Image (tube, helix red, strand yellow):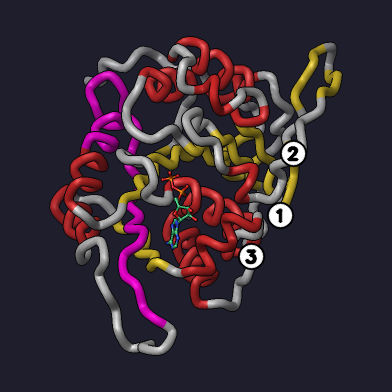
């Protein structure tokens, strides 16, 4: 029997949202935000209504990756309430904790403050009708996770990791954050990011820079789905830095990799 405290019913907080998906990683720098953003774009390109909450308080990078870094969300009055209006780009409604917190301040924020700010971004924003609401979680395990997991009826979690052992050890901890006895969030699958590198002049070669298929093995061992393997590609990094996620290029091989990832999730 689950010891989980009863979660608020979905309609109370996000009345129009069908699926709430946590995108998480054990370790920072494994490409969680990159995968989350490209997954959001891929879903939007398939015609789904997509929202993205950047909850990565330690490094909110989604505004930059979606090319809306210099914008700020407005407020609107709706049914007598002041609501935050998510920023829209590429068919994605997005809010980031980065719009409200200076980066230098984030590190000294106490968990409760961050948790409350995130609750506002969820409950006091006009998210409207969404098929998929993706949440880019902070890396690691913290009380912010617990707040999010206990506040929201999360449909499931996607775990991003690179294939090397140190990242996988943290990914296991990340998984246990969702499957521990206090919470009970299904793991929808694992994404192996930076799975290999293929130089342009050697298109047949794969170099396993961070080790070979570590995530795939972890998925097999634990009985999880491997949603996809994303190689190291310069255009993925560039797309992130330029605010033009590579998933927008649906006909490129890399764009298709994220499209397949989305197909495997839905
Ligand atoms: P995290 O959210 O886990 O901290 P990011 O998504 O911010 O990681 O990625 C860290 C850096 O690595 C970024 O500069 C990003 O563009 C780059 N990156 C992520 N995945 C890939 C990839 N598959 N190929 C090339 N660069 C990548």
Image coords of residue 163 (percent x, y): 25, 57
**Is there CB contact under 8 Å for labels 2 and 3?**
no
Magenta stretch: give its range. Answer: 173-199
Image coords of residue 56 (percent x, y): 49, 33
Q: Nearer the viewer, residue 65 or 143?
A: 65
The reply, left or right, for residue 124 in relation to residue 30 is right
> Does the numbered disc 2 mark a residue whose Cβ is under 8 Å from ligand 1?
no
Residue 123 is inside the magenta segment: no
Question: What residue did someone put label 2 on?
Answer: 87
In the depicted structure, whether residue 199 falls above or below residue 158: below
Q: Any mark on residue 82, and which?
A: none
Image coords of residue 134 (percent x, y): 53, 41
Question: What residue did someone put label 1 on?
Answer: 90
From mark 2 to mark 3, how far is it between C-alphas? Answer: 18 Å
**Is there CB contact under 8 Å for labels 3 and 1?**
yes
Q: Which quadrant is the N terminus positioned in?
A: top left
Q: Quadrant of residue 157?
A: top left
Q: Any mark on residue 248, and which?
A: 3
From mark 3 to mark 1, how far is it between C-alphas? Answer: 8 Å
Q: Quadrant of residue 80?
A: top right
**Dot 2, how many residues are within 10 Å of its Cα: few (below 14), some (14-19), or many (20+)?**
some
Q: Secondary structure at mark 1?
A: loop
**Is there CB contact under 8 Å for labels 2 and 1?**
no
Residue appearing at x 30%, y 54% in the figure: 162
Q: Quadrant of residue 24?
A: top left
Precedes in sequence: disc 2 or disc 3 = 2
Residue appearing at x 49%, y 69% in the figure: 234
In the depicted structure, whether residue 60 falls above or below residue 247: above
Image coords of residue 237 (percent x, y): 51, 61
Q: Secondary structure at mark 2?
A: strand
């Amino acid at each position: 029997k689950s010891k989980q405290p009863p979660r608020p019913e979905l309609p109370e907080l996000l009345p129009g949202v069908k699926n709430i998906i946590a995108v998480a990683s054990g370790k920072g720098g494994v490409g969680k935000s990159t995968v989350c953003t490209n997954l959001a774009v891929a879903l939007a390109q398939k015609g789904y209504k997509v929202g993205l909450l950047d909850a990565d308080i330690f490094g909110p990078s989604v505004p930059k990756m979606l090319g809306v870094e210099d914008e700020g969300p407005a407020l609107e009055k709706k049914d007598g309430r002041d609501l935050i209006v998510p920023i829209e780009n590429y068919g994605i409604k997005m809010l980031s904790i980065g719009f409200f917190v200076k980066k230098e301040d984030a590190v000294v924020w106490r968990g409760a403050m961050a948790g409350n700010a995130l609750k506002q971004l969820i409950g006091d924003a006009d998210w409207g009708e969404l098929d998929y609401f993706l949440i880019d979680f902070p890396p690691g395990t913290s009380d912010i996770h617990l707040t999010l997991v206990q506040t929201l009826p999360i449909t499931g979690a996607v775990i991003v990791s690179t294939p090397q052992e140190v990242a996988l050890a943290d990914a296991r901890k990340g998984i246990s954050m969702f499957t521990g006895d206090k919470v009970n969030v299904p793991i929808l699958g694992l994404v192996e990011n930076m799975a290999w590198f293929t130089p342009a002049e050697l298109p047949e070669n794969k170099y396993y820079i961070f080790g070979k298929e570590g995530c795939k093995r972890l998925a097999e061992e634990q009985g999880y789905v491997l949603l996809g393997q994303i190689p190291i590609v310069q255009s993925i990094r560039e797309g992130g830095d330029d605010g033009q996620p590579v998933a927008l290029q649906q006909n490129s091989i890399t764009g298709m990799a994220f499209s397949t990832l989305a197909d495997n999730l839905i």
